[in-house]
Image (tube, rainbow, N blue to C red):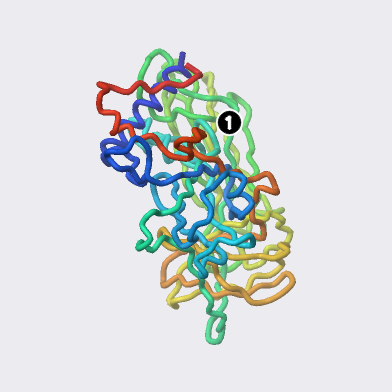
Amino acid sequence: MKQLYAIISFLILTSSVVAQQQPYGNEWINFSTNQPYSNQQYFRIKVWKDGMYRITYSDLVAAVFPMPFNPKQLQLFHLGEEQFIHVEGEADGSFDVTDYIEFFGKKNDSELDQRLYKNPDFVPNKELSLFSDTTAYFLTINSNPFIVNKRMGFETDLNFIGYTPAPFLMKESYVSWMDEYVAFKLIDILDSEYDEGEGWYRGPISSAPVTVQLPVPNLSNDPNAPLLQIATATMGGNNTGNTHTISVSSHGASASNNFIGFGISKFDFPISSNSAVTGGNASVVFTPGTGVVNRTHISYVKATYPHSLSFSGESSNFNEFTVPGNASSKSYLPLTNISLQDPKLYLFSGDTIKKVSMAGTGSGRQMLVPTYGNDKKVFLTDTVYTSALGLISIEPVRQDPANYARFTNFQYINQADYLIVTNKRL
């Protein structure tokens, strides 16, 4: 029954909240009030992991994308917002066989789920979606040729003279679980809204301490670097009326909380010293109280730590980190021991994304990241996800040949009194 109410809640509550924030939530779709379908054709691209994605000429042909077209009119949307993309070869106004589209794709998180809760802060783990890790991006051709569509920018400055290397980067190490779905606060209540703490957790701990290891490779030993910070959230699992305790400790620092029943405990504290971390792992120990039966679920554990400019021993093809802002307009990063074959650096700046030029060969690269005194999130990668790797697909939003790839305009269907939204799982 819980799943039934969850699905109904998602369908009804999401649409109602979106309606409060904006008229319908589909303003990004090009509709005419006197037409039953969208003016433009839209093609769905499913994304389930963070990284750079590429759509080729062959991908568009296979999806029966309308050809030919002016690539300058291409647009990509996600959650109603136009995305910044790179269209290789668009300058000549023709999308040719060797041209392609690249964009940054981000897997599904709790952004939509938050609308199901009484309060968005009640989401225990905002990095994890309750339902799916897959989200959708939508590619279309803007029918207005006079609009300048969003394109990825480029930072090309390679003049390193006068710059001092940044002392460290900031990085996150994170683990979460989907062992058990917890909705204890609603165990005896049928409620269309999600309550505090409802979500996915690790299996419960009750008596013996549990240790979680978080990899923190290349932890900086810079004397001015901030201390490694531990953040986590737990939820109680038995409503006996007794007071329970959960303690969290890590490398000489600890915090604890007393709670009753299904209480939520959130922790965020620094360890005593970065030098206390050895072996490239941060240990976080969860210790339940004694005297009464304890049952505690862990939602996630995160370590935020200063990372040196060396990536020795790291093999991930996607490294996301933050460049701390400084007094200069740009931060100089001479990175070493990079294991990537052909690394590329991308910068997030507000809602834009830029590709940053790099100098160097082999395992070393140098670059200037424009920070202008503010922390900037960047990622380093040598991988582009393609259909050839089986990591991207493109399909029309509608298969009907008469209205191929066009959204239905429900405003046009004005003779109906209401709309029934359902799902085959019901």
Q: In this rendered view, identify the residue nearer to me: 47 or 72.
A: 72
> Depth check: 230 or 375 in front?
375
Return the x and y of residue 326 as percentages of the image width and height. 45, 73
User: Looking at the image, which residue is at 51% across and 49% down?
Assistant: 66
Residue at horizontal 60 percent and vertical 49 percent from the top? 61
**Up-down: is 309 above or below 384?**
below
x and y percentages locating residue 395 in the rendered image: 55, 41
Q: Residue under circle 1?
A: 178
Q: Is residue 202 visible?
A: yes
Asked whether 301 or 159 is in front, the reply is 159
Q: Quadrant of residue 32?
A: top left
Q: Nearer the viewer, residue 112 or 30?
A: 30
Residue 256 visible in the snapshot: no
User: In the rendered view, would you say 284 is above or below 154?
Assistant: above
In x, y percent, where is residue 99?
Answer: 60, 62
Position of 21 compared to 205: left or right?
Answer: left
Residue 149 falls in image quadrant? bottom left
Q: What SS does tag 1 mark?
A: loop
Q: Amino acid at mark 1?
A: Met
